[in-house]
Amino acid sequence: MQNALAKARARTITPRQLEVDIPPHTPRYWMGGDAYSTHLMNALSLLFPPGERFFMDAVREFRGQVSDPGLLQQVRGFLGQESLHSREHKTFNQWLAKFGIDADGIEQAVTDEIAERKSKRTRLDDLAVTCALEHFTAIMAEGWLDETEMRESAVEPLRTLWTWHAIEELDHKSVAYDVYQEIGGDYERRRAWMLRISFGFILGVSIMHMRFMWRDGLFKRPGYLAKRWWKYWGPRGAFTKLIPSYLSYYKRDFHPWEHDHNALIARFERVLSERYDAA
Ligand SMILES: [Fe+2]
Ligand SMILES: [Fe+2]
């Protein structure tokens, strides 16, 4: 882990430019024609613009208390990456409106919900919430990059959009956490917010996911839904595999770089640059 941490600390976090242009013929069920997976990803994407704005605000709040120049550079990189993610997911979410999804309304509702919750807690709590959700995004990013069949079922340019986002989530996965540690954030608060956020996040995504599937009449096909659910939550399911990484967050001496993602990042950076070269 020391080696992974040293490499991570030496890393300069740089936002990679991407501007997604979704062609008109892009299919509604862009995850290989699969409605279940498509709606799951759509639900996540609708959370990103308001969620990532919240992460940026939470980290910015404490930037003035960070003295380590390496970490300060990483904070700048983190802010740059998250703001580009928000912009590109906004484009993606606007495209969803074509299929009757009220992207603006949903993003506004999430923004209002975040503001309401923020008003009831401290800024240090916001940072602990950000650390927890950044851990979620990092493990989901790992899942996306690891699940070759699922990832490759996504049509272009959406596969590139999600792969680009996944790489950068791994790239900056420890920034909020390191800021939290540097300013003396305590273990109990970090653990308590992870517990609360896990429940709220999974419930929030599931409700939106189910609403989209309900609208498309998928509850008339329980066999299909059960099979897809099993693909994610069965014994070798895409989400089940992430549980050990998720649980590691509860250790007192946890650090995001105890899972070394340097090789994975490097591998997918090559995949992305080949796509850029071909474009
Ligand atoms: Fe992001
Ligand atoms: Fe992030």
Image: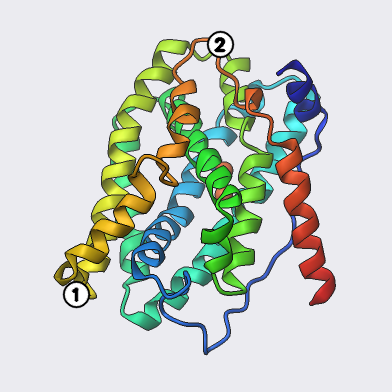
> Which badge, 2 or 1, comes first in the chain's sequence?
1
- Residue 66 placement: quadrant: top right
202 vs 19, left or right, is left
Compared with residue 186, is residue 76 higher up or lower down, i.e. above or below? below
Instruction: Please rate how many residues cluster around mark 2, counting C-alpha atoms within 10 Å: few if below 14, some from 14 to 19, many from 20.
Output: few
Q: Position of residue 141 (x, y in %)?
A: 56, 46
Q: Position of residue 256 (x, y in %)?
A: 60, 26
Residue placed under numbered mark 2 in the picture? 253
Residue placed under numbered mark 1 in the picture? 217
- Residue 107 placement: quadrant: bottom left
- Residue 118 placement: quadrant: top left
Residue occupying the far left of the picture: 220
Q: Residue at x 64, y 31 (%)?
A: 175
Q: Residue at x 47, y 43 (%)?
A: 54
Coloring applied to the structure: rainbow
The local secondary structure at tag 2 comes to loop
Q: Nearer the viewer, residue 197 or 253?
A: 253
- What type is the residue that disc 2 sits on? Asp
Q: Quadrant of the N terminus?
A: top right
15 vs 79, left or right, is right
Q: Quadrant of the C terminus?
A: bottom right
- What type is the residue that disc 1 sits on? Gly
Q: Position of residue 112 (x, y in %)?
A: 31, 51
Q: Position of residue 223 (x, y in %)?
A: 21, 64
